[in-house]
Image (tube, rainbow, N blue to C red):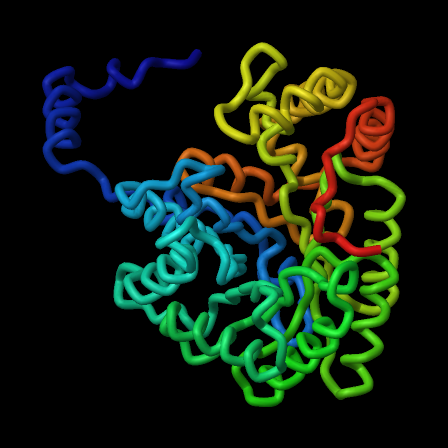
Amino acid sequence: MAMALSNFIPSSCITNCATASNQFPLPASPFKSLKPPLFWPWQKVKMGPLTVSPMGFGTWAWGNQLLWGYQPSMDSQLQQVFNLAVENGINLFDTADSYGTGRLNGQSEKLLGKFIREFPGGKRIEDDIVIATKFAAYPWRLTPGQFVQACRDSRDRMQVKQIGIGQLHWSTANYAPPQELALWNGLVAMYEKGLVKAVGVSNYGPKQLVKIHDYLKARGVPLCSAQVQFSLLSMGEEQMEIKNICDSLDIRLISYSPLGLGMLTGKYTPSRLPQGPRGLLFKQILPGLEPLLVSLREIAQKRGKTIPQVAINWCICKGTVPIPGVKTVKQAEENLGALGWRLSSKELLQLDYAAGESPRRMIQNIFQTK
């Protein structure tokens, strides 16, 4: 017959032992504080000569007052966002020399450089961070030398020795073909001068992407990345053709706006719209997104995830590196929840079908070429 422990030990001893354990608690198990990383080293992604996290963070909002309501008072929270990302293994940060509004032009690059220098704990992280910045194809940048100078200016703003990926922000082929070749030669020159570790492009359509790949290859410069709008809201024939070209030419596709500027967060409805220019766009597209949002919500609930996490994970499962924008710690924490798991093939098919059934699509960037 089982006997209670108290039958053998005096109650006063039990009381004394309990009191002692409160006064002198046992040391916590070292294994309790250990938590697995969001992704393992072998799950990092090759991007030309670089190795990056499966997801990066976009910094368009860091300085943009018009669309994202930036104020300098947000800088301390943005620094917390950066620190949280790095602590969780994120090492790819996308920016641009045009990110910022008016006098704040280039503010995103300045903040990114500052946060790298001031990362807590005295750990030097510059060599681990991959900064992918974009140089605008402004009409006054007409020569390779001017484009190289733009790269030097960005490097100076960030105060880094070398930029990870130097990207041409958009093609001028649609409106200024002669300028395009000068910009391509500028990419070659900044790579040869060691200002950047690799080069990439943004907003290039299928035909122009093949052209610049072949041109750079002939000059001995590999094209490591192509950045386009890619999400469940923008998976038309042209975007999928770009993805297939990237796969065949060993170019890594970086998907920007993976949440459709916020339309794939589940936060907005036709009667609850964001303020500013985004509200006008959302008003046109949101009414036709119900089939897609229903599927996202269903999978999110089943998985114990959020709608944005499912939408970002879809991009990862398609073989792209998404760069969702972040401006608050809450957004950063939620985006990090897109890592460490994968949608099933059945779930991917369900989302692909739902996206096809939704009559509205994201408006493509006006700068994207054919």
Left or right, 171 with reference to 79? right
Q: Residue 299: name its quadrant.
A: top right
Q: Position of residue 162 (x, y in %)?
A: 48, 78
Q: Residue 50: name its quadrant.
A: bottom right
Q: Which of 29 and 107 is in front in this view?
A: 107
Q: Can residue 138 be seen in this view?
A: yes
Left or right, 167 with reference to 362? left
The vertical placement of 5 against 213, above or below, is: above
Q: Residue 357: name its quadrant.
A: top right
Left or right, 140 with reference to 203? left
Query: How many numbered marks appear?
Result: 0
| Quadrant containing the N terminus in the rendered view | top left
For the point 75% across and 53% down, which residue is it? Answer: 368
Q: Where is residue 81 in the image (x, y as percent from the top left)?
A: 39, 46
| Quadrant containing the C terminus in the rendered view | bottom right
Q: Position of residue 35 (x, y in %)?
A: 46, 45
The vertical placement of 152 against 352, above or below, is: below
Q: Can residue 165 be seen in this view?
A: no
Q: Where is residue 180 in the image (x, y as percent from the top left)?
A: 73, 71
For the point 50% across and 28% down, which residue is it? Answer: 276
For the point 37% across and 44% down, which residue is it? Answer: 33
